[in-house]
Image: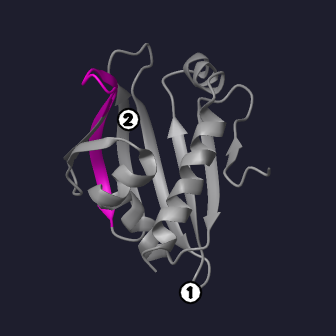
């Protein structure tokens, strides 16, 4: 199966650029990143906090059936312009990854299609390469497929 989410990681760079075109209007794609109820559905995690404003914070966590936290991440939202962009930090708790900076840009292609471009900047080339060794690309593509499927129902 073709991976619709594309990841570009140039050798020797501290960044990756992720692009994905969706069969969704840009406002619905943006809602998928801005509304906690929708984020929880496609990411499969609990939104503990999502303050969509400049200097706002966010926190997501996933628990196992016994109530133990198995994933926790948080960050600060530095810029939030509806239907255009979100700039935020991303940090995983209890992980050996340094915080990263994420620039999400939402672009209308047609009335019914849009593109998400994410530029993620890592502390070092080594940190970026460590991230890329994980099943990162497959997981992101799977999540974006779920986003498309779930948000299609909101049309």
- How many marks the image carries: the answer is 2
Label placed on residue 90: 2
Which sits in the foreground, 132 or 53? 132
Q: Which residues are magenta?
A: 62-81
Residue 128 point in image, percent of width and height: 58, 25
Residue 82 point in image, percent of width and height: 34, 69
Main structural element of the magenta stretch: helix, strand or loop?
A: strand
Residue 49 point in image, percent of width and height: 20, 45
Check contact, mark 2 vs mark 1: CB within 8 A. Answer: no
Residue 46 point in image, percent of width and height: 29, 42
Tag 1 secondary structure: loop
Residue in the picture at 59% in, 29% down: 14
Left or right of 79, for residue 5: right
Relative height, residue 110 to residue 38 (above, below): below
Structural crowding at the residue carrying mark 2, measured as other residues with C-alpha within 10 Å and reported as few (<14), some (14–19) or many (≥20): many
Quarter of the image where one finds residue 139: top right
Magenta stretch holds residue 148: no
Left or right of 140, for residue 106: left
Residue in the picture at 27% in, 20% down: 68
Relative height, residue 149 to residue 12 (above, below): below
Residue in the picture at 49% in, 74% down: 26
Farthest front residue in view = 65
Circle 1 is placed at which residue position? 111
Which comes sooner in the sequence, label 2 or label 1?
2
Residue in the picture at 55% in, 63% down: 148
């Amino acid at each position: 199966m073709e991976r619709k989410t594309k990841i570009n990681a140039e050798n020797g760079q501290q960044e990756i650029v992720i692009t994905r075109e969706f069969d969704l209007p840009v406002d619905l794609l943006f809602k998928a990143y801005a509304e906690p109820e929708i984020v929880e559905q496609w990411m499969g995690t609990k939104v503990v906090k999502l303050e969509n404003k400049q200097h706002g914070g966010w926190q997501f966590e996933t628990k196992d059936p016994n109530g133990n936290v198995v994933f926790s991440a948080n960050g600060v939202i530095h810029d939030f312009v509806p239907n255009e962009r979100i700039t935020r930090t991303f940090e995983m708790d209890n992980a050996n990854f340094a915080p990263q900076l994420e620039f999400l840009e939402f672009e209308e292609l047609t009335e019914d299609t849009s593109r998400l471009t994410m530029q993620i900047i890592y502390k070092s080339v080594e940190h970026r390469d460590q991230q890329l060794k994980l099943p990162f690309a497959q997981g992101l593509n799977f999540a974006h497929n779920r986003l498309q499927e779930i948000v299609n129902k909101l049309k």
